[in-house]
Image (cartoon, helix red, strand yellow):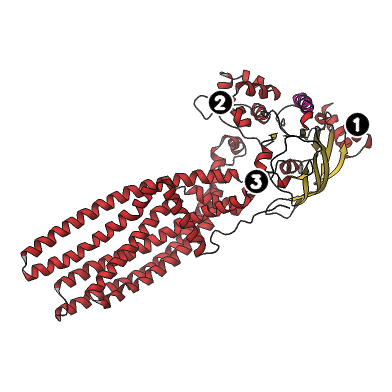
Amino acid sequence: MTGDVSISDPEADGLRTSVRALWTIVKLTFRASPPMAAAMFLLEPIAVVNSLAIPLFLKLFTNAVVAGSSAAVVTMGVAIGVAFAASLTLSTLGFNVRITMMERVSHHVDLRTSELTAGIPGLEHLERPEYLDRIEMLRRDPQGVGNTVNALVFNLVGVTRFVAAVVLLASADPLLAVFPVVGVVPLAVSRRSQKRQQALEDERSTIWRRARHLVELGTQPASGKELRLFSLRQPLLDQLRHQHRSEDRLDRRVTRQDAVEAAVGDVVFSGAHVAAVVYVTLRALAGAATVGDVILVMALAGQVSGALAQLVGNYAWLSGNLRNARRFLWLLDYAAARRRDDARPAPRGLADGIRLRGVCFTYPGTDVEVLHDVDLTLPAGSVAAIVGENGAGKTTLVHLLCQFYQATSGTIEVDGTDLVSIDPVGWRARVAATFQDFANLEFPAATAIGLGDVPRRDDLDAVGTATDRAGARVVIKSLPDGFATHLGKQWADGVELSGGQWQRVALARGLMRDDPLLVVLDEPTSALDAAAEHALFERFAAAARSRAERGAVTVIVSHRFSTVRVADLIVVLENGRVTEQGRHEELMRRGGTYAELFELQARGYR
């Protein structure tokens, strides 16, 4: 079975998930630097409490002036100055620490996102739109999770300011403590706005991915030829404008709703602010309060107003950044769920071989079965060729053998052990492979080949051996600086290769490992002519038989039937089913699909 781990909504579990995400970020900050993290969470809140002492000192200063007490006036004046200087100093220190910590957390999250994405054993998640949308959001705003640290401190500062201001208001008159309750209105408005923004982000993520794809089509060399040949410039621009217009429409809709509701919240809170000042002023006129109380309330009402405005803005900011923090938490959970701590190590060699029993496979997010009840035995030490028309399931089959996917049903056994139970990292360390959709690694040629076996990537003798195995020595000789030549024309000292040359470099990279248990060659020479491919396949088969003592299995996928005659076993796939298998001579005598397609291709070369 697939053992698939569902991709749940990062909003699932609501408050509990948000608290977990926040706690994850807090742990990241303390892991980066415990002293700096502690300073970050303390300095600015202390600075706020210190700054709120200024209205209290101002009240006492005013009362001293009214009472004509020169000593008290001087004392309170000095206190105001000291409090102001201390608050400013603490705020500046806190700001510098916070920015440093935000950058450290952002860098850590950026590295972990790449590490986790690349470290998930299979490829299923890379073909799910919902996964790609979430990763797009993480990558589009790489500072988003780090900014959660920023937003968290700002919210802590806002809450501290608000609570301290309410306490001081109550000291002037307990009834004034009710005034901040009105702040629930703008907070509720902010919550509604944030929900709309989150929904907007979900809608925009697909639009952003489409727009980025269109930009890449218009700016990359690979698509540049067809873009010009087929006059695609205008259609692509039209599509890009359409994506931008769609995004603009979404933005305008949400902005209008936010503006109307925010105006209502501001009017309600402003009215309460004015009412509080009028109330304490009337009490002062009646002799129930001092002039200093009026000054205190006027200053604190502004502080409460500012604190609530800060809380509203910071809450929205924290919620927005927390959305990315929840995505990061989801990625951590997803990667952890895919990790197999009880997996078996890969075998040292193969005695029996690899056997597929009733294997069926359906790609994630689809309901079309690509492989149907595949029963197949690949004996240890054998060279097997898989042939069939496009879409027959050849590449899917080798992807299952490499543990990029798990069978939807059925089993793949390695010397009788279910492949699912074998550590995928350890298994793939014993796999040598080249695929038809190979990567063009734009590094020095030696590195581009050596990365096929990371522990020996700097071993030039090993790189040279792999180069000879792939018949790529002719490519290296054509380069101005040989193995030291930087590949890729987008670099100042780079040299561009032809499609066939890139494929030979990829093939050499795939043949770097000396002791694989499984060698997969999936259309590895599609950019070469038939004669060159045939010569290489004969070399591959000879090399595979030299590894027979370890029982290594070599699987060759090719659409050219004439080049697979060297295989010990030829498997014909049709519509995801094994319809024929045997040696070349045996299949030709049967006169089935293989013989028919072989003759059809052979006539094309006569």
Within-10-Å neighbours for mark 2: few <14, some 14–19, many 20+: some
Within-10-Å neighbours for mark 3: few <14, some 14–19, many 20+: some
Does dot 3 land on a helix, a strand or a loop?
loop
Mark 1 or 2, nearer chain start: 2
Please name whichever residue, 508 or 96, is drawn nearer the observer in this view of the structure. Answer: 96
Numbered circle sitting on residue 123 = 3
Measured as percent of width and height from the top left, residue 522 is found at 73, 35
Please name whichever residue, 278 or 238, is drawn nearer the observer in this view of the structure. Answer: 278
Q: Could you tell me the amino acid type at mark 2?
A: Pro
User: Which range of residues does the magenta coloring cover?
Assistant: 530-547
Kindly report the distance in space between the C-alpha atoms of the residues bearing marks 2 and 3: 28 Å
Image check: 363 left or right of 155?
right
Q: Quadrant of the C terminus?
A: top right
- Is residue 1 placed above or below 534 in the rendered structure? below
Can residue 389 be seen in the rendering of this structure?
yes
Image check: 222 left or right of 410?
left
Mark 3 or 1, nearer chain start: 3
Residue at the disc numbered 2: 444
Magenta segment includes 306? no
Does dot 1 land on a helix, a strand or a loop?
helix
